[in-house]
């Protein structure tokens, strides 16, 4: 059992079962033993690979997308360019490099990275040493400086802790993590019912919500309404709110049991985009999408970008083509249909590139 596993067991032994939400939060961001706090989880040698780590094209296209959005915003200077959960800093680095072809945009950028992990912040610092733009760090989204802004968040919302409610004895009860008879971790329904939940359900059904994500989206949307700007969220998730659980653990590119070795594997939950959109609209913002990542990247020029890179480095044609397919393809193992892109924006702006119009 991991160090964090032993720590969590001690907490449960002393205080009783903890919520799934608290479990997930401890597993990912416990200051000492949390999964993100002391490792670089990305890439072939790590646990999972994200779109910016697959190809430079992802960040480059998003950088050029941001330059167009900045134009639509009336070219504010400074523009707060904020990334939530930047991982290795690869997306931001590729975006800033591509943005060089729009020098006024580049010159207006004031970059803030919102990162919970000191280890990853250090890696981001190294990645962006030569980026040629002022970069600051913060630990939560409300630390981003005021003013017109573009926020980016790739695979960030899926890392925020979810609450779960399980249908048990004809009642919804919050789902907890408890100790089983042999002292291992197990899921268990809380004793107290939660009669405020108005949904019907069958024994064993699970409802999942992400209060931390909703609060973040609501506050961010309010800020964009007041100060101008947009936020682009890309993640895997669903377009319709439904019953069911999506909590999953990944280690070494394989699915594992989420209760085994907390702190040693990545824990995520699918993003309920419909519910996030409701939070954004409740704060007065416009919502665009979600659209499939593959469609979004096509709309903003991934095919032309692939061709340009292949023309410049013909010996790498296979590599660029493969990356393009992985990012836009919708077959098993490809990201184009599984991942979705959604924008929340102040109502004064027209639809951003890649999105048809408000739903
Ligand atoms: N966007 C990157 C990394 C995705 S992994 C990429 O696409 O490669 C999730 C990132 O969010 C990591 O950098 C992790 O440390 C960070 N993170 C997770 N929970 C966070 C929180 N509550 N606040 C700030 N950052 C968080």
Image (tube, rainbow, N blue to C red):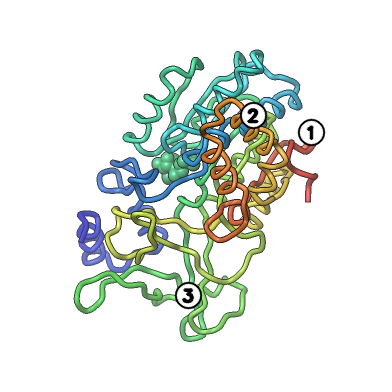
Sooner in the amino-acid sequence: mark 1 or mark 2: 2
Q: At which x and y percent is residue 27?
A: 33, 54
Secondary structure state at the residue bearing disc 1: loop
Q: CA distance from mark 2 to mark 3?
A: 51 Å
Q: At which x and y percent is residue 322?
A: 54, 45
Residue under the image location 48 percent in, 19 percent down: 131
Looking at the image, residue 194 lies above or below residue 339 = below
Residue under the image location 36 percent in, 30 percent down: 123
Looking at the image, residue 223 lies above or below residue 50 = above
Q: Would the CB of label 3 be found within 8 Å of ligand 1?
A: no
Residue under the image location 45 percent in, 32 percent down: 89
Tell me, yes or no, whether the two marked residues, 1 and 3, touch with CB atoms within 8 Å: no
Tell me the tag on residue 308: 2
Q: Which residue is mark 1?
A: 348
Tell me the tag on residue 166: 3
Q: Would the CB of label 2 be found within 8 Å of ligand 1?
A: no
Looking at the image, residue 128 lies above or below residue 214 = above
The total of numbered circles placed on residues is: 3
Taking the image as shown, residue 311 lies to the left or right of residue 5, namely right
Residue sitting farthest toward the front: 315
Tag in front: 2 or 3: 2
Residue under the image location 59 percent in, 59 percent down: 331
**Other residues around mark 2 within 10 Å, as few (<14) / some (14–19) / many (≥20):** few
**Other residues around mark 3 within 10 Å, as few (<14) / some (14–19) / many (≥20):** many
């Amino acid at each position: 059992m991991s160090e964090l596993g032993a720590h969590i067991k001690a907490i449960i032994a002393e205080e009783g079962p903890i919520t799934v939400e608290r479990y997930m939060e401890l597993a990912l961001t416990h200051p000492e033993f949390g999964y993100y706090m002391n490792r670089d989880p990305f890439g072939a040698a790590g646990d999972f690979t994200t779109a910016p780590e697959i190809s430079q094209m992802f960040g480059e296209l998003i950088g050029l997308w941001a330059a167009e959005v900045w134009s639509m915003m009336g070219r504010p200077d400074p523009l707060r360019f904020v990334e939530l959960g930047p991982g290795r800093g690869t997306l931001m680095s590729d975006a800033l490099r591509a943005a060089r072809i729009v020098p006024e945009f580049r010159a207006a950028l004031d970059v803030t990275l919102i990162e919970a992990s000191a280890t990853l912040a250090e890696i981001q610092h190294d990645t962006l040493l030569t980026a040629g733009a002022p970069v600051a760090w913060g630990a939560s989204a409300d630390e981003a400086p005021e003013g017109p802004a573009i926020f980016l968040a790739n695979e960030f919302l899926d890392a925020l802790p979810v609450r779960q409610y399980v249908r048990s004895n004809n009642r919804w009860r919050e789902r907890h993590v408890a100790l089983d008879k042999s002292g291992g971790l197990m899921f268990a329904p809380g004793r107290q019912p939660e009669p405020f939940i108005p949904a019907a359900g069958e024994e064993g059904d699970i409802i999942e919500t992400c209060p931390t994500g909703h609060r973040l989206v609501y506050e961010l949307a309010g800020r964009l309404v007041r100060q101008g700007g947009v936020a682009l969220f890309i993640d895997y998730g669903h377009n319709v709110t439904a019953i069911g659980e999506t909590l999953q653990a990944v280690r070494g590119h394989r699915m594992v049991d989420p209760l085994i070795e907390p702190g040693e594997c990545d824990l995520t939950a699918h993003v309920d985009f419909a519910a996030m959109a409701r939070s954004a609209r409740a704060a007065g913002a416009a919502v665009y999408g979600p659209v499939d990542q593959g469609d979004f990247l096509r709309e903003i020029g991934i095919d032309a970008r692939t061709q340009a890179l292949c023309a410049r480095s013909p010996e790498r044609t296979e590599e660029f083509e493969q990356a393009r397919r992985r990012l836009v393809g919708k077959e098993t193992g490809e990201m184009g249909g599984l991942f979705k892109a959604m924008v929340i924006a102040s109502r004064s702006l027209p639809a951003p590139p890649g999105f048809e119009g408000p739903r």
